[in-house]
Image: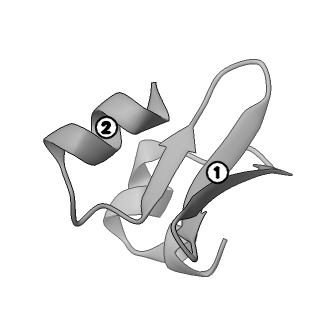
Amino acid sequence: MVVLVNESLPKIRRVMIRGEECCVWELQRQTWKTRHVKSFSDWDIIRGACDTI
């Protein structure tokens, strides 16, 4: 899935996944790495709180 996102949106560097478990996929040195994070809301994303996740 991340490969498809990268092809469609080549400048994207972070993908945030929210569900039963939340995680962030980040592009680091041309490799996608994932890490689990606490839950976040749409409002957290809008106000920029997730920029430091």
Q: Is residue 4 left or right of residue 33?
A: left
Residue 21 rendering spot, x and y as whole percentages:
79, 28
The residue carrying mark 2 is 5
Q: Position of residue 38 (x, y in %)?
A: 81, 50
Q: Amino acid at mark 1?
A: Val
Residues at marks 2 and 1 touching, judged by CB atoms closer than 8 Å: no
The residue at the point 42 percent across, 45 percent down is 42
Tell me if mark 1 has few (under 14), some (14-19) or many (20+) residues whose alpha carbon lies within 10 angstroms of its own: some
Report the mark closest to the observer, 2 or 1: 2
Q: Residue at x 57, y 77 (%)?
A: 29
Closer to the chain start, of discs 2 and 1, is 2
Left or right of residue 16, residue 35 in this image: right
The residue singled out by tag 1 in the image is: 24
Residue 40, position as x, y percentages in the image: 62, 48
Query: Is 26 on the left or on the right of 35, as rendered?
Result: left
Give the camera-side residue of 29 and 19: 29
Q: How is the image coloured?
A: one colour
**Horizontal placement of 3 versus 7: left or right?**
right
Q: CA distance from mark 2 to mark 1?
A: 14 Å
3 or 14: nearer the viewer: 3
- Say which element carries label 2: helix
